[in-house]
Amino acid sequence: MLSHNLGYPRVGSQRELKKASEQFWAGKITKDELQKTGREIRHRNWQLQNEAGIDLIPSNDFSLYDQVLDTSLMVGAIPERYQQLIDGKSNRELDLYFAMARGVQRDELDIKAMEMTKWFDTNYHYIVPEFVKSQEFNRYSDKVILEFEDAKQKGILTKPVLVGPVTFLVLGKEKEEGFSRISLLEKLLPVYIEILKELAERGAEWVQLDEPCLVLDLGKEEQEALKFAYQKIQQSVPNLKVLLATYFGALNTNLSLAANLSVAALHIDVTRGAESLPEILQNQEFVNSSKLLSIGIVDGRNIWKNNYQESLDFIHQASNVLGVDRILVAPSSSLLHSPHDLDLEHNEAVLTPEIKNWMAFAKQKLHEVSVLAKLAGTDYKSDEAFITNQKAIQSRRTSALIHKQNVKDRVNAIKEIDFERVSPFPTRQNIQLEKLKLPLFPSTTIGSFPQTDDVRQLRARLKKGTLSFEEYESRIEEEVISSILWQEELGIDVLVHGEFERNDMVEYFGERLSGFVFTENGWVQSYGSRCVKPPIIFGDVERPAPMTIRWSAFAQANSEKLVKGMLTGPVTILQWSFVRDDQPRKDTTFQIGLAIRDEVIDLEKAGIKVIQIDEPAIREGLPLRKSDWKTYLKWAVDAFRLSAAGVADQTQIHTHMCYSEFNDIIDSIAAMDADVITIETSRSQMELLDAFADFNYPNEIGPGVYDIHSPRVPTVEEIMTLLENALNVIPARNLWVNPDCGLKTRKWPETEAALRNMIAAANLLRESV
Ligand code: GLN
Ligand code: ZN
């Protein structure tokens, strides 16, 4: 039984590529030095996979920025605005590449970057291909060939990986009207075929074409495109074996389509769509063909040790029907979404040996894949590796660190009434109007203020032990007090404490809740050179002590005005962490929801009258298939309501979301029943508020009146216009005035100038009505 891998993390275990890229962009190292770093990472990755005993090792899974952008460059899908950067010299390819990824602003040039969006339901972001009606494709970048040859020189015959042609088109965007991007397939295929032919000529036996679009709801056009593409490829390059990779979900409605495409092997993700396995094994055409089935059994997107017993059961289920020779063993998806190497976690105070023993990062997962391929079909039960694995699985299943009966009992005891505020919104609104005494069009901000180097230093020094806790607290107190005075002077109505004590809106809470651990080196690429180090939720979640009262109460004690408490919501905490795979996400979210609920109640007790629970990640948690949305939205909304509903009518609950696509989930947003919601809309001139207007959204709304992602200071007139637009669709009594999102990435001068203009606009608006 062969083992293979779909892709390996490419940032480097010490984030070497991140550092080199950023240095290159800053002009501190040369192109050659950057390329050298890339090459070293690739060589190390190939060697690692070789040593782990992986039979088919991928190439071209490496990327200097993003594999979808690599594909755009490979097929010459280079938008018009970058044409001036093409001068035929291969040493300029990199400039063009980074210009497409990041935009350019130098000399006379000012070209915008291509758009970026989430890669399926992961936290990885890809560069969205752009297509026009007269789109042509021409082979442009030879990266895939070069990397294949490079590995060959090292003695490794790799399996080159490419984003499949149909997924490439599906993930792109039409930049003008009047055509469908899928119809470009006929023009696109010849470029793919030319490259595949060359790979075959150079000795490639296998190639992996990633078509994860097969786990989405596909229309007729896309389905036909898939059939056409793979027939054509097989006819044109018959001597090359194509492994068609699907991942991130079950094949579901596309099962028989996928099972019968003209390819040599089909990869399915058994960790996120186990039902596809028995379905494939019942598909007679597939069974009667000579196709191989690649079983993606080691979770490429989480950090838990594989359960060998369960995996071997799956593998045997397949080999019983197809025979061992037709099975490949693999991770579920590329390991790009896992941190590099658990062996780099040395600090036992952070990650205790007991918990560490339950985990596997990318390097460990390679080993798991190769062990599973070896154990399958043998008398594995007496194998040392198997026994050790089962011990770890057993330890996790029963550990008192994970399982807290009181927490489970509390979740089980949740009743309908726990999701309900005392009175419905109209009653609450009247009570709040009377108690909070806010003016018409109240102004506020979203929570964080600029995180200066000074403030970051304070936290870093506290962590290192070079700053005492007392000193740290008094320095943060100074920051809070000065921000309060500053907000009062500006004339903001509902103040915030500024979040100076927070590193990150999820990490801060994870560090204060039980059931979370952190890593020192568990970085995962989010986009380009940006990496994140998600917390790991390993056990039942509880709040041992209040988490934010100290700073919120302190801030409120220093102002006559209202100071808003600031919390991260349960869905966002879940969504931005590695999660448990031993209980449904819903249960974990409800546990977090209860912890946040306790915090909300404690804030109220401490005299905080306005409390914001941020949920920017609700939308990104949406399942890939529409048919699964309803179930998800129900529990996600319930978890928010659970966290918010423990307070009296007069306590005003806010929520915040930094995106603006609400059309398809507006009923769920309304069901959250926050007294006030602040959202992003400024970039669309408030058009996106239409979703709220069409729905007759009843509660109060603060549509962001300026874009905090740019240092640009909006004028009073601009803000006025936006507010007037908003008033066309939102009743005056429901309208708030605030920026798009938190201000922590901004600098003080532009923040002050922008907020001054914002307040001036709010005042003008009050006078005008
Ligand atoms: N309260 C957070 C802040 O202001 C919200 C951040 C976010 O929405 N991502 O930083
Ligand atoms: Zn935001």
Image (cartoon, helix red, strand yellow):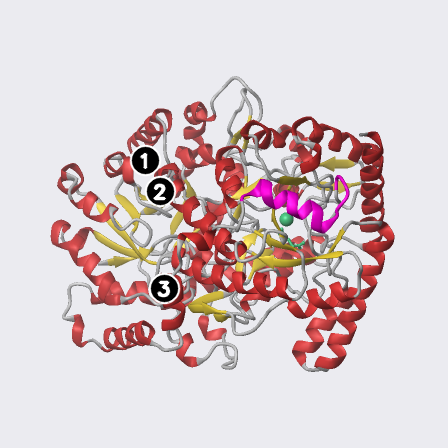
Instruction: Confirm or deny contact between disc 2 and disc 1 (CB under 8 A).
Output: yes
Looking at numbered disc 1 in the image, what kind of residue is underneath it? Answer: Val
Q: Amino acid at mark 2?
A: Ala
Is 92 placed above or below 685 here? below
Residue range in magenta is: 424-441
Secondary structure category for the residue under label 2:
helix
User: Dot 3: within a 10 Å radius of its alpha carbon, few (fewer than 14), some, or many (20 or more) residues?
Assistant: many
Cβ–Cβ below 8 Å for labels 2 and 3?
A: no
Q: Indicate the amino acid at tag 3.
A: Leu
First in sequence: mark 2 or mark 1? Answer: 2
Q: Which residue is mark 3?
A: 366
Residue 596 appears at what percent x and percent y?
Answer: 53, 61
1 vs 3, front mark: 3
Mark identifier at residue 200: 2
Percent x, y of residue 205: 31, 47
Looking at the rendered image, the disc whose residue lies closer to the viewer, 2 or 3, is 3
Question: Real-space Cα distance between discs 2 and 1?
Answer: 8 Å
Q: Which residue is mark 1?
A: 237
The reply to whether residue 238 is visible in this rendering is: no
- The crowding category of the residue bearing disc 2, from other C-alpha atoms within 10 Å (few below 14, some 14 to 19, many at least 20), is some
